[in-house]
Amino acid sequence: MPMICKGAVTKTLCAVAFFISGILFIVPAIALAYDNAVLSHIKLANTRDDLFAYFNVENAFNEKNTQAVENGISSSFTFYVTLFKTSSGLFDKKIADIKTRATIKYNSMRQEYTVVCQWKHAPALITKSFDEAKTWMTEIDNLKVVPLNRLIKGDKYQIRIKAELEKVTLPLWLHYIFFFVSYWDFETDWYVINFTY
């Protein structure tokens, strides 16, 4: 009888250990998948004269970079948009190569966030709402890609879009607070749209 109990206890302990180890492997994987920044709602539109890009960056803010912003560290997202004329040959012709930036800075004295979006060519946006500031940082609208007179009717084109959080060099004393600062760096994959003008 003691042997049976011992076997049952061993099986129970093994099952519990297996369950806990499963959670330890699954939870970080879910967290990593959730924390990966991705581009979404990518659209192209045109006026009479120009081609514009619109897109959102999701999961751009996590606990680490939120903590950095709220400690007054300026953070910038850089957006890369490249337009190619595609061909059946080996090389595509680059038509436009855009690099633009959105920067957020928190003023703790005034308790307000300032966001500068380079592509808007407008004064800085100021708000007391972090949610509103995050929206300004992550919703890219009316980003001019190229004048339409540089495109040829009936030709095929490809636009590639990518976003990244610029790596920040922290003051020495902050390295102790943000020991895992590398965890709030991100870079999305390149997102590609093929279209015919």
Image (cartoon, rainbow, N blue to C red):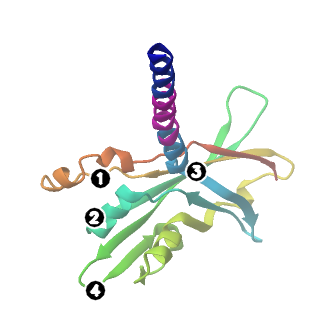
- Tag on residue 110? 4
Work out whether mark 4 precedes mark 3 in sequence or the reverse, and give the earlier one: 3
Instruction: Write down the residue under mark 2.
Output: 73
| Residue at x-position 30% and y-position 61% | 68
Work out whether mark 2 precedes mark 3 in sequence or the reverse, and give the earlier one: 3
Residue 24, position as x, y percentages in the image: 45, 36
Image side of residue 55 versus residue 164, left or right: right
Instruction: Check disc 1: other Cα within 10 Å, few if <14, some if 14-19, many if 20+.
Output: some
* Residue at the right extreme of this rendering: 154
Q: Amino acid at mark 2?
A: Ile
| Residue at x-position 59% and y-position 43% | 190
Residue 2, position as x, y percentages in the image: 44, 17
Residue 6, position as x, y percentages in the image: 44, 19
Instruction: Write down the residue under mark 1.
Output: 168
Work out whether mark 1 precedes mark 3 in sequence or the reverse, and give the earlier one: 3
Work out whether residue 62 or residue 47 is closer to the camera in this orientation and state it: 62
Q: Main secondary structure of the magenta part?
A: helix
Does the magenta-highlighted stretch encompass residue 127? no
Q: Amino acid at mark 1?
A: Val
Work out whether mark 2 precedes mark 4 in sequence or the reverse, and give the earlier one: 2
User: Mark 2 and 4 residues: CB-CB less than 8 Å, in contact?
Assistant: no
Image side of residue 80 versus residue 48, left or right: left
Query: Relative to 71, is 168 above or below?
Result: above
